[in-house]
Each structure stands twice: as C-alpha cells, then as structure tokens.
Image (tube, rainbow, N blue to C red):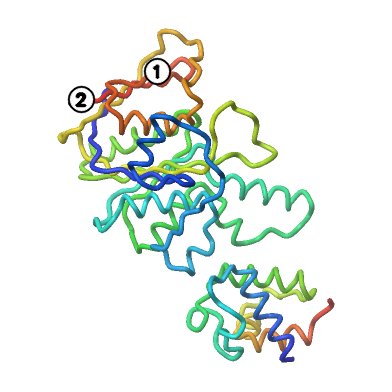
Amino acid sequence: MTMAFSINRWVAWAPGLTEQDAWTRWFSEPHSLPAEGTPPLSEMPAMMRRRVERLGRFALQAAYGCQGDSPSVPVIFASRFGDISRSVDLLRQLAHSVPLSPTSFSLSVHNAIGALYSIARGDTSAYTAIAAGEETVEAAFTEASALLADGARDVLVVIYDEPLPGPLGHASGQMDFPRAWACWLRAGDEAPGYSLTCHPAEDTRDAPSSDGLPEDLTVLRFLVSSEARLDHKVGTRCWRWQRHA
Amino acid sequence: MLQLEQEIKKLVIETLHLEDITPDDIDPAAPLFVEGLGLDSIDALELGLALQKSYGVSLANDSKENRRHFASVRALADFVSAHRKA
C-alpha cells in the first residue's frame, strides 16, 4: 500500500531554532542544542498555559504556528515518549507515599497535550494521540493518510519529544533536546508530493543513524530537503519515504 | 486573620502557577471559581491538597460544605483557622 500526501506548510521549534531558515541551516550542520528556551505560547490563554510543561509548550507552539488562521482540521499529536517526566514524578511521589498532584495526574495521559489544544481553541475536530516507538512519525503519517483517504481535505500532524528524565535516560549517542514540528498535510495532488510505503527490510542489520539526529528530525530533514528518498529501517521493516516532483 | 488571608493568597498563586497575579490582585471576598479568579475543579483538588500539606486541614467529601469553604480566600482563611493542625 502506498500512502501519498503533500505538505502545504511546516513549522518547527527547538531551543534557539524557531524559523525555517534557521532549521535549514541547522540541518546542513546539526549540532546539539541547549535544553532551555521554552516557547512563549502566547496564543494560549494564560489560565490554560499555566498547566503546560516544557514538552507541551513546544508541541502546542508548533501546532498553533502551523495552524495559523486556518479553520479547524483533524489533528494528530504524536510523540514517542510523550510527557513521561510527569509520570516519572508521579511514580516517585507514590513511592514516597506523597499525595499526587491532581493537575499533574490529569495531564499525565498521552492525549493531554492534544486535549489542551482542543479545549483552548474550542475545537471539536477529530483528535488522535499516537505513540509507536521508533516508528512514531511513520504511524502518525499513516494515520494522517487514512484521514485524507477518508475525505479530510487537510490534516495537521504534530510531532514532539524531549530528553527522557533521569531514571529512564541513557546515553543513546543521539542528540537530544526538546523539540516539536508540525506539518499541514493535504491529499497527494499538490506539489511537492510525497509517498510513504512499508516493505520487509532486505537487510535487517541495524543501520546506525548517520549523524546522531533523533529519528523524528531525520524525517523532517528529508521532508524539507531536496533528497529523493529516505529509508528508515526498524527491525524487519523498512519504511520508505519518497519525494515526487 | 489578615495575615492568614495573605498566606492563602500566596499559596493559591504558587500552587496553581497563576501567571502575572500578585496577592494584592486577589480580592479576599471575591469568588475563586468560575467567575472572579476563574479557577476550575482540578484547581479545587490541587488547592485542597496544598491546604492539607500546609495546615493539616482535611476536606470532607461533602461537596456542599466544600463549596462554602472554597467560596473565597476569606472563606478558606476562616476554615483553616478553625481546623488547622499545623
């Protein structure tokens, strides 16, 4: 099965990287970024924003930026690990028999960030929250393609992650910093068009990531570059991203 | 009592991460929820927990009683001074 779509526009946020030009320069020579530099998220009412932690601020800033003044469309929020630092804090409090913060508990579920976006904008469109390990970005675009095939004219995809908290973090050899990016997708009848397919991997040896980019940013770099193809091998599967002029 | 009201205002601001609001901005007689400060039910739970930690007061499951205690900063101060253990 081939999934086809086009990208109308994209937005990405990381500490110190907020404009497309800066991202393009960074992609040509990636280097690590500081963990500080939380987005202002001024689009969200202060009474809601006060509950949003760092990762949520990145995700929502990218969502608002890509949304612009456009009418509501189906939204897919996808994150490999989500706001797991909240869960780790809650587990730590449980272990020490400290009463849990009701706010933190209510926001620790994977769809909480998307829900805040929906509530803040009074938007009752279809919302999906996805986590699919190393294949999170592919799963998000698969879901988006399904929505487009089902008749949606546009779909907003938001991808976000941040470094894992203490007990789970380990040296992955990858660059890691809080980041989020969002794409406004349309059915594949506009240029530049892309396709995404999934095949059995011919060679199941792990191919190390070329330059230590987190896997989600490897996809973004491909989408905004002029490369023809990106293969992402995961176990016995190979996801193939292709650009069609 | 004025001092306790001031303390509770600070507790509300810090516990609920209210941006750009100082204790002086909070009218001790104004409603905390929906109108007035605009807090919601999750804030009520969070505030209940903070009061328990700071003053050792525990809130019953009686929502009518709680609604009265949580009506305003002044009502909370009355409740805390009558029941505090810390």
CA distance separating discs 1 and 2: 19 Å
Q: Which residue is mark 2?
A: A244
Which image quarter is the C terminus of chain A in?
A: top left
Chain of the residue on which disc 1 is drawn: A
| Picture quadrant of residue A53 | bottom right
Q: Is residue B8 left or right of residue A154?
A: right
Residue farthest top in this picture: A203
Name the residue rendered at 31%, 43% in the picture. Answer: A10
Indicate the quadrant containing the N terminus of chain A: top left, top right, bottom left or bottom right.
top left
Judge by depth and name the residue closer to the eye, A38 or A135: A38
Q: What type is the residue that disc 1 sits on?
A: Cys
Q: Mark 1 or mark 2: which comes first in sequence?
A: 1
Q: Which mark is residue A238?
A: 1
The vertical placement of A203 against A176, above or below, is above
Q: Secondary structure at mark 2?
A: strand
Q: Is residue A87 left or right of residue A141?
A: right
Residue type of the residue flagged with mark 2: His
Between residues A187 and B71, which one lies in front from this camera angle?
A: A187
Q: Are marks 1 and 2 in contact (CB under 8 Å)?
A: no
